[in-house]
Structures are given as structure tokens and as C-alpha cells.
Image (cartoon, rainbow, N blue to C red):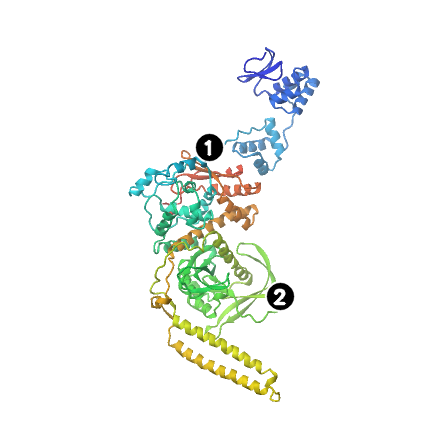
């Protein structure tokens, strides 16, 4: 006979909750009661039920989920000290030595902020068991864990995208705005975010603060104007997220759900491939992309002016295998002469790019430096010495250009120094002697990124070139443990060896940039089909001159081979007049001499013919059968500039991750996974917040590093472009929500 609504403990004892009172019944008779939060009364009643035999221990454990040891202690206390002991006030109990009142207050604040026990114990350096015991004793109150409000699931969104596909297209859910844009009544729709769960590639939103910091929308008005449903800023966001998520080109986006990717920019979907290619062409225009790239270079020069003392220039060849017969050039990574496009990149000492010059007709690095790179550097680099400073100090330089042996030329060094006071630095060619070991001294130097290392160095003042082309330089040599000496020459004679050598060897940072950007940011992509005419001012090598020059070089090769044969014959036994083979030897030598005379005559004729032929002619004077056209460069310029922004943003984020003792490769690998991570999006238009909840990484350590990065991102208080929503990032580790601050406005120089 159990009262209605009660829970049976056994056949004769039951318990029922009446508001805030728990009542215990023996049959139909109430025998005990205690308040809901009265732990002492509960322990006393449990002990009485066990001592009287009304209940057994396993019955209480099953109903109340109590610990057996705790019940045993309550029975011992009742038998030894009586019922009054459960309600005695504890007198003389000392406070905790670790969790003092002050510490308890700090812990309670962190608990209220939503941090988990592990994160609090790690931050305050207290034991996890100590913290858990305090919560169990009631000295600390852990608030109930809040869950992220649910939004539309991926399945829901997929069904909705398919449902509207019979109208305008897949995932075109904002029908009215699309129709208005098609009639010219709307130009660029507003980005609107909805609550979404499990958005793929949602981690790419973490890169937005770094992208804006590196000037994603700086001087965007230089680009072509876009009309229709999508705005210029939304197209740029699609392109940067495309590269960060490692989709190398527009065609690869065809394998991505357009509706899901559109959630990253607050739209129903991204443009289809054909539409996106048209938008890229509109943005690029004929010269728009070049103007924007030039403005971005100026922006980076001004922002990172402390890195412009050493500038690194190197060439990179994009191999082209199409129908258009582009001139061939040597591709070092394949060790072949292939048709392609030459790029000359300008980077800083740690590999960060400033700008790139494309040369489909390439006359070499020195010509690219002279006509394309040096004029831009002289105009764009800030804080250069004034004319008065240069006049007062004959050895003062504006900046230093570093390149490999391709740019080794004493005459060019002298030209840059005499005309512009620009210093050059490269490896020395034709090093024939080794310096004495006694000249070398082991010094402690630092890489451009600040890491110390030891190196054996020696330096001398010397000259390069002969006659009027000679110039004074400083030569620095590094000696390895095996005795090998690497020679460096520079016209920056005021700097010492421990400064010059690390910056010369930092040139490998640019090579690393080529390898990484080629694999991850599509700097080798063609991106546009078709061909167009070169400007009339473009000159090419005259095919007639090239043919004559090839014949001349072939004859020189034959001449060298014949001279080698003659020299070899002088050491043969037949050269002795007393030898019986002397007659045959003379006949053979006469044949070689006759062949050599014939080669000399042909060489003189070709030399005379070469003098009558121009080495370079305008492009439009090429014979029809040997003519070629240029591949449209504007779209490559746009994507390369966006790739540079992405690389700089990723490098900045990797630097923050390196604060957690991760190496640079580990940081970049973690970021690649982060950009492809799934996330939940929850906009709060009342608080003007856009909450991005990232799903967990593969390990606890990775979650901790991501939490460290998100703390820095939340401190930037970034406003999502085109909205008034502040981006708030939540990681799988609650410690990532530690530094969420108030809103700030979008930077004035980057407004839409």
C-alpha cells in the first residue's frame, strides 16, 4: 500500500516529494521528512532506515544514487554519536590552505563564466580533485552547463535547397531579392546570417580578422564595379575562403555545396562557376587588378616598413603546355627548357610577399629589376634617406636588394649604386681561392626572425669588375665544419658580417614561400583561357638573329672540339717523326687543320651576318609563322594578390600559435585543419553578435592551441563586413571564451 505518486524503496518503505519537502512512508504512515537541500537530515534518515532494518543498503543506492561509503559513514556516525551529531555546528574547523576565501571567489567567477573544471585547475594551478571536492562539499556552486541553441541542421538545409531547385536554381532561397537584382532594382544584397548547425569549412571564418588586418578591402574601389545580386566584397570573401580552404580554382568549387559555402558570407549560396569567372573578369578588368595590386604593395610597405631594409627578388617559372607557343625558359625545378611565364617576386626577409611582376617575354632578372622592380621600390618604400643624407654620407644606401647568382653583375651593381644608391647582395661567382682559417671567427648572429645561432665568418674589403665597371664591395665568407667556404658580396659596406650573412642565407625563406604558395595558394594556376596581343612597345628576340646566333654557337662548339683533338694528337706516339705511324698522323692532323680553317671561315661569315641583323624587334614585326600572343594576365594578377593576402594572414595566425610552443610547420598544418573544420553559426541581432562555435579537433593539445588563438581573435572585436555583428569565436575548450569584449566599429579605411 504505497501513497499515490510515491517512489517505492522496497515493499514497505516509499518516498514522495511534496514541493520542497521529501516525506518517507512506512506503508501509509509518514515517519520521516526533510527539506530538499537538507543534506544532514537526509544522511540522518538514511542511517536510521539502515540501522532499524527497514531498508537495505543496495535499495538506497539504487533509488538515491548514493555512494556506499557515504552511507556506511552515516551509519557509523549514528551508532557512535547519535542523531544530534548530524545537526551539530562544526566548531573550530580551519579553512582550506589551498582554496582560501579569496581563491574560492576567483574559482566561482570562472565557474560562472562557463569554464570547465580542467581549465580552471590548469589556470589557477590547483588540483582537479581539490576543486571537485569543494564543489561536492557545497563550498562552490557549478552552474548548469548551457548548450548552444539549435539551428537548422545540414539535412534540413539540404532538403530546402533541393526544394527550391525547380525555380531559379539549387539553394536560391532568397527569391525576391534575386528577381529584384535581375531587373536592376537591387545592387548587392545584404549579408544575413541564420542559426546553422554543422556548417562545413566554417573554421575559415577564423581567418577574417587577420585578412582584414592585412588589407583585404583596402582600396577595393580600384577593382571593377560589379552589378547584380552579389557585391564586390562578397565576391572577394568567396575567393579568400576558397583559397584558405584549399580549393585551388573556381572549378573545384563545383564539388562544394553552394548553399553551405554561402552560409560563410551570409547568403543563400555562392555564385556558380561560370558566374564567378565572369565576376573575376569584371573585377580584374584590363588594368584594375594591376592598380589594386600596386595599392596593396604600398599598403604593406607602409604597414611593415621595418622589414623593407632587405628586399628579396627571385624568379619563378609557371610552365605552360597550351597551344600558344610562349618563349621557352629554363625551369630549375624540372631542369628543362620549357614554355612558360616568368614571375619575379619581391619578398621580405621572412618570405612575406610584397608584389610580383609577370613577364611572358622575359629578358632576364637584371632587365626586370631595371625596368619593373626598381622604379616601384624607389616610389613605394617609405622612410628612405633624403638627398642631403645621401650626399653627406658617401656609403649610405637606401635599401638592399638580395638575389641569387642570376643577378650577379658588377656592372649592374655599379649602375644601381651610382644612379640610385641602392645596395645589392648576392653569392660571388667564380670563387677560386680559400681564405686562411685564422681569419674566421665564430660569432653569435640572429636570423631575421630573431632566432640566435653560431656561425664562422670572415670579411674583407675588395673590388668587383674591371676598368670603369669596377666597384668597391664587402666580401663575407662563411666557413663550415668541413672547411667549405661560401662567399657573399655586397655594396652595403657599412654593415658587418654578422648582419649580412644571416640575411643572405634567409633567401631560402623565399624559396619556401614558392613551394608553399604553389601547393596551397594557386600561384601556378592559369585561371583564364584565350590569348591577346602584346603592347606595341614589347620587344622580342629576332628569330633571324636567334638562328644565326645558334649557328655561331654550334660552330664555336665544333671549333673547341677540333682544338681539343689537335691538342690530344700532340701527345700521341705518332707525333714523333721517327715513329712508323708518323705519316698517317700527319695526314690526320692536316684534316683537322683544314676543318679548323673551314670553321673559322664560316664563323667569320656568320659574325658579319649577325651585325646586319637586329637582335630585338617589336613584337608586331614577328613573322606570322613564328608569332605568339600573351595569355590574359589580369585575372592571374587578381588571384595572386588575393593569395598574398591569404598567405600573410595565415602567417600572422601561425605566429600566434607558435606562442604555444608549436613549430611553424605544425602551426600551418593546424590552421589548414582549422579552416576546414565544421562550425555552428548563431547570430544574435539583439546583442549584435555572430557566434561561431567550432567543433573539436583531434587531440586535447590541439584544442588548447586553438583556444589560445581564439582568445586573440576575440580581442580584435572584428565586425563582420557588411553587417553590424561582432564575431565571437567559441572553441571546443571553454578557455577560448575568456576574453570576449564589447563591439568596435569596422575600420574607417576599409568601409564598404
Classify residue 505 by image quadrant. bottom right
- Of 310 and 95, nearer the camera is 310
Percent of width and height locating residue 198: 47, 38
Q: Which mark is residue 413?
A: none
Kind of element beneath mark 2: loop
- Residue 336 pos. (x, y %): 49, 64
Of the pair 739 and 655, the residue shown nearer to us:
655
* Left or right: 250, with 62 as reference point: left
For label 2, the residue is 483
Residue count near mark 1 (Cα–Cα under 10 Å), binned few <14, some 14–19, many ≥20: few
The C terminus, quarter of image = top left
Q: CA distance from mark 2 to mark 1?
A: 67 Å
Specify the quadrant of the image occupied by residue 482. bottom right
Would you name the residue on which mark 1 appears?
A: 150
Dot in front, 2 or 1 = 1
Tell me if residue 99 comes above or below residue 470 in the rendering: above
Residue shown at 59%/87% (left/top)? 582
Q: In terms of image quadrants, where is residue 77?
A: top right
Where residue 639 sits: x, y (%)? 41, 52
Direction from residue 1 to residue 596 in the image, left or right: left
| Above or below, 517 relative to 601 | above
Looking at the rendered structure, the secondary structure element under dot 1 is: loop
Residue 350 in view? no
**Mark 2: few, some, or many residues within 10 Å (few <14, many ≥20)?**
few
In screen coordinates, is 209 left or right of 136? left
- Outermost residue on the top side: it is 29
Amino acid at each position: 500500500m504505497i501513497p499515490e505518486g510515491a517512489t517505492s524503496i522496497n515493499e514497505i518503505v516509499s518516498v514522495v516529494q511534496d514541493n520542497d519537502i521529501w516525506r518517507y512512508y512506512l506503508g501509509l504512515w509518514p515517519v520521516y521528512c526533510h527539506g530538499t537541500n537538507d543534506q544532514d537530515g537526509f544522511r540522518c534518515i538514511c542511517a536510521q532506515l539502515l540501522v532499524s532494518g527497514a531498508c537495505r543498503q543496495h535499495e538506497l543506492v539504487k533509488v538515491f544514487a548514493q555512494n556506499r561509503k557515504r552511507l556506511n559513514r552515516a551509519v557509523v556516525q549514528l551508532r557512535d554519536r547519535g542523531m544530534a551529531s548530524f545537526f551539530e555546528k562544526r566548531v573550530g574547523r580551519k579553512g582550506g590552505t589551498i582554496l582560501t576565501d579569496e581563491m574560492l571567489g576567483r574559482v566561482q567567477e570562472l565557474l560562472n563564466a562557463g569554464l570547465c573544471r580542467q581549465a580552471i585547475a590548469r589556470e589557477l594551478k590547483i588540483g582537479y580533485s581539490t576543486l571537485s571536492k569543494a564543489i561536492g562539499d557545497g563550498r562552490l556552486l557549478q552552474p548548469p552547463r548551457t548548450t548552444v541553441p539549435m539551428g537548422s541542421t545540414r539535412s534540413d538545409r539540404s532538403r530546402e535547397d533541393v526544394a527550391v531547385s525547380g525555380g531559379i536554381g539549387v539553394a536560391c532561397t532568397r527569391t525576391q531579392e534575386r528577381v529584384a537584382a535581375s531587373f536592376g532594382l537591387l545592387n548587392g544584397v545584404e549579408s544575413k546570417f541564420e542559426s546553422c548547425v554543422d556548417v562545413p569549412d566554417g573554421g575559415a571564418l577564423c581567418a577574417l580578422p587577420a585578412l582584414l588586418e592585412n588589407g583585404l578591402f583596402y582600396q577595393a574601389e580600384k577593382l571593377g564595379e560589379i552589378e547584380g545580386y552579389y557585391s564586390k566584397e562578397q565576391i572577394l570573401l568567396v575567393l579568400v575562403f576558397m583559397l584558405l580552404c584549399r580549393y585551388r580554382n573556381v572549378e573545384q568549387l563545383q564539388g562544394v555545396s553552394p548553399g553551405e559555402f554561402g552560409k560563410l558570407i551570409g547568403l543563400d549560396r555562392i555564385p556558380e562557376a561560370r558566374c564567378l569567372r565572369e565576376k573575376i573578369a569584371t573585377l580584374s578588368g584590363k588594368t584594375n587588378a594591376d592598380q589594386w595590386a600596386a595599392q596593396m604593395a604600398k599598403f604593406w610597405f607602409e604597414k611593415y616598413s621595418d622589414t623593407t631594409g632587405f628586399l628579396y627578388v627571385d624568379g619563378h617559372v609557371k610552365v605552360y603546355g597550351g597551344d600558344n607557343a610562349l618563349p621557352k625558359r629554363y625551369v630549375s625545378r624540372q631542369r628543362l627548357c620549357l614554355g612558360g611565364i616568368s614571375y619575379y617576386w619581391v619578398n621580405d626577409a621572412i618570405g612575406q610577399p610584397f608584389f610580383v611582376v609577370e613577364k611572358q617575354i622575359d629578358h632576364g632578372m637584371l632587365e626586370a629589376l631595371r625596368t619593373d622592380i626598381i622604379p616601384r621600390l624607389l616610389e613605394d618604400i617609405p622612410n628612405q634617406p633624403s638627398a642631403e643624407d645621401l650626399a653627406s654620407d658617401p656609403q649610405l644606401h637606401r635599401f638592399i636588394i638580395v638575389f641569387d647568382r642570376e643577378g650577379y653583375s658588377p656592372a649592374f651593381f655599379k649602375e644601381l649604386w651610382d644612379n640610385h644608391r641602392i645596395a645589392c647582395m648576392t653569392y660571388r661567382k667564380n670563387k677560386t681561392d680559400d681564405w686562411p682559417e685564422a681569419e674566421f671567427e665564430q660569432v653569435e648572429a640572429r636570423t631575421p626572425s630573431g632566432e640566435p645561432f653560431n656561425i664562422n665568418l670572415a670579411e674583407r674589403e675588395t673590388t668587383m669588375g674591371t676598368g670603369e665597371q669596377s666597384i668597391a664591395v664587402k666580401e663575407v665568407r662563411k666557413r663550415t665544419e668541413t672547411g667549405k667556404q661560401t662567399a657573399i658580396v655586397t655594396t652595403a659596406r657599412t654593415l658587418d658580417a654578422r648582419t649580412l650573412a644571416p640575411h643572405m642565407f634567409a633567401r631560402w625563406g623565399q624559396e619556401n614561400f614558392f613551394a608553399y604558395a604553389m601547393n596551397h595558394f594557386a600561384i601556378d594556376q592559369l585561371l583564364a583561357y584565350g590569348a591577346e596581343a602584346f603592347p606595341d612597345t614589347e620587344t622580342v628576340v629576332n628569330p633571324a638573329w636567334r638562328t644565326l646566333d645558334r649557328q655561331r654557337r654550334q660552330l664555336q662548339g665544333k671549333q673547341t672540339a677540333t682544338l681539343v683533338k689537335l691538342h690530344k694528337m700532340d701527345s700521341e706516339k705518332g707525333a714523333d717523326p721517327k715513329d712508323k705511324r708518323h705519316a698517317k698522323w700527319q695526314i690526320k692532323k692536316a684534316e683537322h687543320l683544314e676543318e679548323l680553317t673551314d670553321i673559322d671561315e664560316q664563323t667569320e661569315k656568320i659574325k658579319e651576318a649577325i651585325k646586319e641583323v637586329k637582335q630585338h624587334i617589336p613584337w608586331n614585326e614577328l613573322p606570322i609563322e613564328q608569332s605568339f600572343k600573351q595569355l590574359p594576365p589580369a585575372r592571374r594578377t587578381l588571384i595572386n594578390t588575393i593569395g598574398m593576402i591569404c598567405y600573410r594572414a595565415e602567417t600572422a595566425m601561425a605566429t600566434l600559435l607558435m606562442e604555444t610552443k608549436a613549430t611553424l610547420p605544425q602551426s600551418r598544418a593546424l590552421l589548414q585543419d582549422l579552416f576546414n573544420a565544421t562550425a555552428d553559426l548563431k547570430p544574435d541581432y539583439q546583442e549584435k553578435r555572430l557566434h561561431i562555435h567550432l567543433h573539436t579537433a583531434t587531440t586535447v593539445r590541439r584544442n588548447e592551441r586553438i583556444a589560445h588563438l581564439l582568445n586573440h581573435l576575440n580581442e580584435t572585436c572584428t565586425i563582420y563586413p557588411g553587417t553590424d555583428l561582432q564575431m565571437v569565436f567559441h572553441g571546443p575548450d571553454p578557455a577560448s571564451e575568456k576574453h570576449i569584449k564589447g563591439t568596435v566599429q569596422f575600420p574607417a579605411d576599409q568601409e564598404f
